[in-house]
Amino acid sequence: MKKWTSISMLQLVAALAGVGLVVFVAILFRSEATVENVLSPKVAEAMYLATSTLPLRVSGVVEAADSVVVYAQAAGVVTELTAREGALVEQGGLLSVQSTPVANAQVALAAAERDLSLLQQGLAVETAVGGVEKATVAAYSADEIARLRFSGNDNRVQEASDALRVALTGAANTAVAGISYVDAQRPLFTSTGLEKYESVTTELYGQMPDYFDNGLRTSGTAVDATAILKTLRADAALSSSDVLVLSSVLGTQLQSLHEVLQTAESDVFEDLSAGEVAEYLGVRQEVVAALQSVVASTAAFQQVADTVLEDAALLDQSVAITALDESVARVTSRYTSLIESQTAVVGSAAVGVAEAARSLGVVRAPFSGRVGEVYASVGEYVTPGAPLMSLAGNGAREVEVTVPARFVPIIKMGTSFVHDGETIGTVSRVGGVVTGGRGVVVIALQTDVLVGATVTGQLQVRTDDVFVLPRKFVFFDVDGPYLTYTDGEVSRIEIVYDAGAKLYVTVSAVKVEALVPAISISL
């Protein structure tokens, strides 16, 4: 009896060992990560490469400083500089105010989310004359942020957009009539005036204009005031960003048209009859009124959009960068000034919009002191990290930290230093690599910290070359780590920063394909 039991136990152990070996082999086989045997149907959501702010942990001892540089925390146009060189300011006193970029940023988001039409390509790039930034922009509008907060689209934004659309319809009619008048009175206008109009519209559209055919005509497709008018009348589904694009170009057209009209004034009053002079003055006045209407309506819309964000910030509903990166911001546009394709590239999600949503461009003195040099000027468009002015005083504090040498080239002056979720400083100087393969970074503190205290935080390093992804999507072999795409191709990576569950990596071959997980739990 005992002998039979002993044999049965041995058989059971052997059987269990065999099952374990089979399972081990199966798991090992799955780890080879082909598309067919690894990508499980249970995967709820595809994973794509996405850029992200890299939170680099640093620490250092606080030291007294003679002065610090105050940096912009958001992108926008400087509208106020309340502190002048040599002025004394109190801690918390207002230094500068910027208009927020939310309304203009709608343009880039809308362009990234769908195919770009020829009209949008012509209007949405290189339009510095019309007041739209030349810079690459990828951000979320006020109504998009409202949806992200699960509060729905704010009616104020839509109402302001509708009002702007009505104003633009009238302005487009005026532009068409004004250009037709120039065509009819062509001999009155000097070559200088026409060349000026030509240079303005060429810079706007990147093409040689034919203003005697109501605007620009290229490849058989008109991009002109008439086309804008048709769009405004026919397309009831125009988004706020579409309306803003049309606003910027109409403003530019009307401004340049007004300048052309002015070049003919001497000839008008000398050569034309009283009735013809009255007609000219009427056309010019209509152009001026239309331009004022476009400017005022656009400003009103931007103010409403910015107010929506400000209200949300006051209600403590700001969207964190990490939340955008992980949940909803899985799109981005690499939206450049030279668009060669009709389709925007949508894929990764390096989004700086949270800074615009939380910091509305109001900069205050971090301590009491005297303003030194002022670097910015009213009307200047500045980006996060741009120096605004220097401030000297007993409250000036800075902290020197060291970082791995590989991060030295990508850390920029103005990079945010975050402690417990709050920005308390910005990078003011970046030194070279010192012994031990580390570099020196000096952070100007914007909060009251005792000299000698140790401060720990994260440098929010932003780069388009570093991607963040869960650790489970990284494979390893004898040559190092790599990624596998769902089309079967692989790409070598370098791990720049290990944050535990997440890895920050550089990728040799970036693709828009989804990634295959290195470990599949479906057996």
Image (spheres, helix red, strand yellow):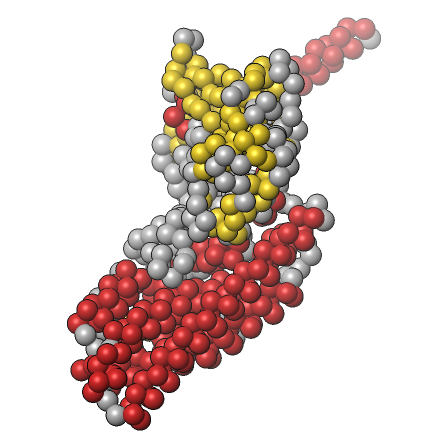
Quarter in which the N terminus is drawn? top right
In x, y percent, where is residue 25?
A: 54, 23
Looking at the picture, does residue 94 appear above or below residue 160? Answer: above
Nearer the observer, 457 or 178: 178
Q: Residue 395 versus residue 320: which sits nearer the camera?
A: 395
Above or below: residue 193 compared with residue 22: below
Which residue of the protein is positioned furthest toward the right in this rendering?
1
Looking at the rendered image, the quarter that the C terminus falls into is: top right
In the image, what residue occupies the spot 81% across and 6% down?
A: 2
Image coordinates for residue 381, horizontal then vertical, percent: 43, 48
State the image quarter where residue 60 is shown.
top right
Which residue sits at x=35%, y=69%? 255
Give the mark count: 0
Vertical position of residue 499 compared to residue 150: above or below: above
Q: Is residue 54 visible?
A: no
On screen, residue 260 versus residue 498, left or right, reads left
Q: Quadrant of residue 269?
A: bottom left
The residue lying at 59 percent from left, 42 percent from top is 94
Quick one: which residue is furthest to the top in this view?
3
Is residue 193 shown left or right of residue 50?
Answer: left
254 vs 17, nearest the viewer: 254
Give x and y (percent) for residue 387. 46, 36
Residue 509 lies in what quarter of the image? Answer: top left
Residue at 40%, 11% in the rendered image? 434
Foreground: 147 or 132? 132
Where is residue 126? Give x, y as percent. 33, 56
* Residue 187 appears in the picture as rendered: yes
